Amino acid sequence: QMVEDVRLAVNGECPVEFLGRMGGMIPTESEILNRIRQIIGRKE
């Protein structure tokens, strides 16, 4: 649901990605950075 809320909030101005974790655990800094690198690599 949160991803959809963010998509509605940005109103198509930028892409929204999901970094899922089981049990509501907060992603680590390195997990976030790795995901950003994956996303950037996909678009190059």
Image: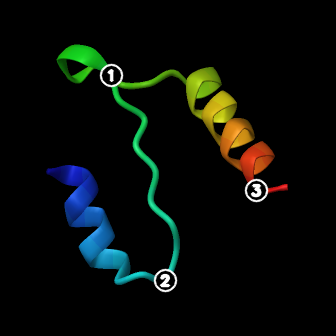
Query: Residue 13 at what x, y percent from top left?
Result: 49, 83
Q: Is residue 30 above or below residue 38?
A: above
Q: Secondary structure at mark 2?
A: loop
For residue 14, side relative to residue 24 (left or right) = right
Labels 3 and 1 touching (C-beta < 8 A): no
Q: Amino acid at mark 2?
A: Glu
Q: Which mark sits nearer the N-terminus, 3 or 2?
A: 2
Q: Going 44% across and 24% down the picture, which residue do you hit? A: 27
- Badge 3 amino acid: Lys
Q: Residue 10 or 38: which is nearer the viewer?
A: 38
Q: Residue furthest left?
A: 1
Q: Quadrant of residue 18?
A: top left
Which residue has dot 1 on it? 21
Q: Are marks 3 and 2 in contact (CB under 8 Å)?
A: no
**Few, some or many C-alpha atoms within 10 Å of disc 2 (few <14, some 14-19, many ≥20)?**
few
Q: Is residue 37 above or below residue 16?
A: above
* Residue position for label 2: 13
Where residue 43 is drawn, which disc sits there?
3
Amino acid type of the residue that numbered disc 1 sits on in the rendered structure? Arg
Comes first in the chain, label 1 or label 2: 2
Between marks 1 and 2, how big is the CA–CA gap? 25 Å
